[in-house]
Image: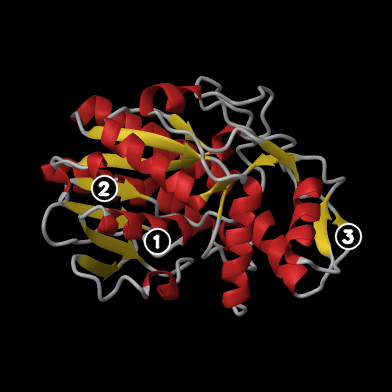
Amino acid sequence: MNTAFSRDWEHAVVTGGAGFVGSHLCAALLDAGAAVTCVDDFSTGRRENISALLDRPGFTLVEANVSEPFDVGRPPGLVLHFASPASPADYLRLPLHTMEAGSLGTRNALALAHDAGARFLLASTSEVYGDPQQHPQNERYWGNVNPVGPRSVYDEAKRFGEALTTAEADAQGTNTGIVRLFNTYGPRMRGYDGRAVPTFIRQALAGEPLTVTGDGLQTRSLCYVDDTVRGILAAAAHGMRGPVNIGNPTEITMLELARLVIELTGSSSEISYIERPTDDPAVRCPDITLARDKLEWEPRVPAEEGLRRTIAWYRAHVDS
């Protein structure tokens, strides 16, 4: 992974660095030889996600809300803006905080990168495609988003963040990039964060019914976190503006996922059907042609292997 870095990237800032993906990014950057400053207000991130990093040389924690001005000490060469509630349970609980992270937080992170002459990378999301009418979704698709629906605080915060990042590059010449992350899973996801993988694993290990929404035929494309992190760092190193999809092009229905989790955990749980949330996308699958062609990136970890690793982590962290 060291080939992804230049001398200018000796110091990287990760906003939201105590979150699920952010904490894995911090570890990968440290492993690659960069000094890392993690910025997090712990509104949804967890200290235990970075506990193993606190004593590592080059790691610094700055507890701050990125929607307000924050200081990271010496100038960075790379700014990765990942600060935002990302799970439905969180962004529905913290709607204004979510929108501020996508607007004011993005502005402050961009200013940090611009002033330092650093590379900036925005973590956007497949949610910008909404309930898509194009399948699979490529980066040229403008999406089908309900701007006043219950998911809009997250969807529109990310869409605004993309627009702001683009405007910053055009107006100020800041070196920016955008990655659109599709469903990512792996160790450190909170069991009660409302997303399918941790919910199903938690329920299966507890012997509870797995709650599948609707008829369970809606699809998602699940990318193991190690693969997602490789894609993020490849996009950062490439210098492309994007946006670029980072996700797994292999679809799975929620019903198939539930059955696979039951099988891999050896659980006696059954499946229970519950009401499907408003504006829940029927399909979600990335076209990763751009990532393959420009970044030479694609996922490596099959779903069964990634789920086995994730299940093993949950067994060792029963209180997560």
Identify the amino acid type marked 1: Ser
Q: Earlier in the sequence, mark 3 or mark 1?
A: 1
Residue 280 placement, left or right of 144: right
Residue 95 visible, this orientation: yes
Residue 255 placement, left or right of 18: right
Identify the amino acid type marked 2: Val
Q: Which mark is residue 222?
A: none
Q: In this picture, is 315 found above or below 308?
A: below
Q: Residue at x 46, y 50 (%)?
A: 226
Residue 192 placement, left or right of 25: right
Q: Which residue is mark 3?
A: 272
Residue 279: image location, x then y, percent: 72, 41
Residue 314: image location, x then y, percent: 61, 70
View extreme (bottom): residue: 319
Q: How many marks?
A: 3
Q: Which residue is mark 2?
A: 79
Quarter location, residue 55 = bottom left
